[in-house]
Image (cartoon, coloured by chain):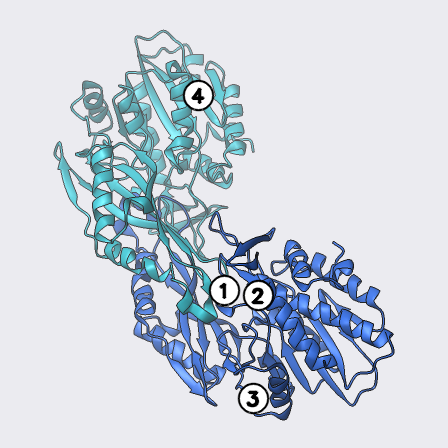
Chain colours: A cyan, B blue
Amino acid sequence: MDIRALLSGDVAALTEAIIACESVSGNEKALADAVESALQDLGGLSLHRDGDTIIARTETGAGQRIILAGHLDTVPLPSTPGSRGTVPPSWEQIDGEQVLYGRGATDMKGGVAVQLKLADDVAAHLAAGGSLDRDITWVFYDHEEVEASKSGLGRVMRSVPELLDGDFAVLLEPTHGVVEGGCNGTCRFEVTIPGVAAHSGRAWMGENAIHGAAGLLQVLSDYTPQTITVEGLDYREGLNAVRIRGGVAGNVIPDSTVVEINYRFAPDKTEEQAHAHVREVLAEAGISAGQQKVTDSSSAARPGLDHPAAQAFIAAVGGEPMPKYGWTDVARFSAQGVPAVNFGPGDPLLAHSDDEHVTAQALRDCHTALHRWLLGG
Amino acid sequence: MDIRALLSGDVAALTEAIIACESVSGNEKALADAVESALQDLGGLSLHRDGDTIIARTETGAGQRIILAGHLDTVPLPSTPGSRGTVPPSWEQIDGEQVLYGRGATDMKGGVAVQLKLADDVAAHLAAGGSLDRDITWVFYDHEEVEASKSGLGRVMRSVPELLDGDFAVLLEPTHGVVEGGCNGTCRFEVTIPGVAAHSGRAWMGENAIHGAAGLLQVLSDYTPQTITVEGLDYREGLNAVRIRGGVAGNVIPDSTVVEINYRFAPDKTEEQAHAHVREVLAEAGISAGQQKVTDSSSAARPGLDHPAAQAFIAAVGGEPMPKYGWTDVARFSAQGVPAVNFGPGDPLLAHSDDEHVTAQALRDCHTALHRWLLGG
């Protein structure tokens, strides 16, 4: 795939091309190759590649440095036949709006397209003899939509952290074009319900591990998630079974059911406090300590919108700041001491849905706002 | 694998060798090859192969014909670490008994070993100039432990039914060495619980299809199976979830959960009556007709122990007849007009368990009883 020619055109057409290059987590290589090649052709940027993570930096010697970051991967394609949020993408005209449907349309190939278009803008600005108030680092990374331990951003932060130094970071995750501060944390538990295998024609000799999951699923179904206010922003929590598997054959009483549970917690809690809460709910469902393990965990990030760099950014792009519900890598930047916010095109409520889409106008507006912030007028 | 040399020795050692040749449904070829080759070497038998089903027949012109049938396949190997009912098999000395552990030890490689040893006995008897009161057909078939539509026995019954003609059939399924009459029927339903996908950080935008399965699992967990008496034998029923799967990723609210349900029903019911009962239970759990489909179904078989051939067999091998709980291919033979019973070594309660085993004595006793029935003395 060659996207170089599209960088100087409409950011909506660029988004379409990027969606067309399927990049479900683990399959980012083709898209990473295209991004690397396009950035190389721009010239004037210092480039680094680590696996399928690409980092591009201006090195003009400006006193400050800002970071524009986004992930290249998406969740798997929708499993429901007829879903429009899939690959290849498609356009629809709705109430006079051009709407682009496709996996990643909101999370977050629109943001990646805006990042790339800004790189083209900046390269052209520098080539024309312009200067920068702040140097800029672009980060395009792999494996965001899976366990935190696989994250390309985390990998580079551990191996060459100096490449990600900066004074302020913007994650181009979908925020409907407003600034979203902080983020919920997330942790995953794997719960195993044991049973005793037997021939299903003599079920009374066994113990059914799928029936044994009824109580846990009922507790999760009855659970009422909280909304917690932190620094004036309201964070909605969620506790959900996200995967279940059990049984080995159509005529065997299942000896094991595994339920994967995801807790999204507000930034009033540490990871440890969040884990303790899940353990309480599991105890209520009669799940013992030996039946559960934490398989993934990432801290929440407090909003931090009182930081001067964040205030300046809000002033430049406008709008009323909101809380970020989903976990994003602003938490990683915060943990490294780099103030960070989310700001990107598309409705975050559509992320991961079978119906994922973004309007061409949202993509153009986001690009315009960031262009104004970086290069003025 | 070459089992020819073992046919004239101890049936327990022969069983061990047959277990050692793993033959989970779909993987029967190596064992079928070994059986075919051993039967060829015996001589005096007319052989037929259809896929991985082997049929061997004496053709002495005796007025009657009996059938000895058994399946070569097993359920998958146990998933619990440390299980002994696996491959390779192992021997243990328990209270002075030699006990053979391994997948298929009871269901039903012990029965297959007895069938093969009887073939060796009969071939030797004929080679020594002996005669037979009744011709004998041996059937070794594939794909018994999976959907009925894949059964090797069913395939041959459709394609060359004359090869399976006979006056009486014995299925060497495990019966603890007593005659078991008839069998429960079995049917499988696949139930789909729908949901609406969303990012798990914004769960309120979706509808959790795993939580949605709680009610169904609770109904199944609360269900009390019936015991139904048919022709003086008590048939225990069972209704169980045997497999469950749901969810696509660790951060997506699942849009679908699929539960596979197996109903084992007594021979007082037709398949249609059995399906109607499952539909009633599903309706109680709020499952609509559109969410369910029948994926597999096999009729029950009434005991039929009043048939003269069955009475003669019971008189020859002794013991008090019992009901068969599991579905077996006696139902297929009954449907073809061939009276059939189950009679084989091993405890049927251990079939498909992680701990499957059989005693050497049970194998030898079964062989002795059938040898006496077939060849006298």
Q: Which residue is mark 2?
A: B107
Q: Position of residue A313 (x, y in %)?
A: 23, 23
Disc 3 versus disc 1: distance between alpha carbons?
25 Å
| Count of numbered badges drawn on the protein | 4
Check if mark 4 and mark 2 are on a common chain: no
Q: Earlier in the sequence, mark 1 or mark 2?
A: 2
User: Share a chain, discs 4 and 3?
Assistant: no
Q: Earlier in the sequence, mark 3 or mark 1?
A: 3
Chain letter of disc 1 in the image: B
Q: Nearer the viewer, residue B205 or A321?
A: B205
Q: Nearer the viewer, residue B281 or A51?
A: B281
Marker disc for residue B305 = 3
Q: Are marks 4 and 1 on the same chain?
A: no
Dot 3 crowding, Cα within 10 Å, few <14, some 14–19, many 20+: many
Q: Which mark is residue B350?
A: 1
Tell me the residue that label 4 is attached to: A55
Q: For the residues tagged 2 and 3, is the chain the same?
A: yes
Q: Is residue B108 visible?
A: no
| Residue B42 in picture, x, y percent from top left | 82, 67
Image position of B127 with respect to B25: above or below: below
C-alpha span from label 4 to label 2: 60 Å
C-alpha distance separating marks 2 and 3: 23 Å
Secondary element at tag 4: strand
Tell me the kind of residue under disc 4. Ile
Provide the chain ID for the residue under circle 2: B
Residue at 28%, 48% in the rendered image: A288
Q: Amino acid at mark 3?
A: Leu
Instruction: Tell which tag, 4 or 2, sits nearer the viewer.
Output: 2
Q: Is residue A141 left or right of residue B108?
A: left
Q: Is the residue under label 2 in contact with that under label 1 (CB below 8 Å)?
A: yes
Residue type marked 2: Asp
Which residue corresponds to the image point at 54% horizontal and 72% vertical from the top-left? B176
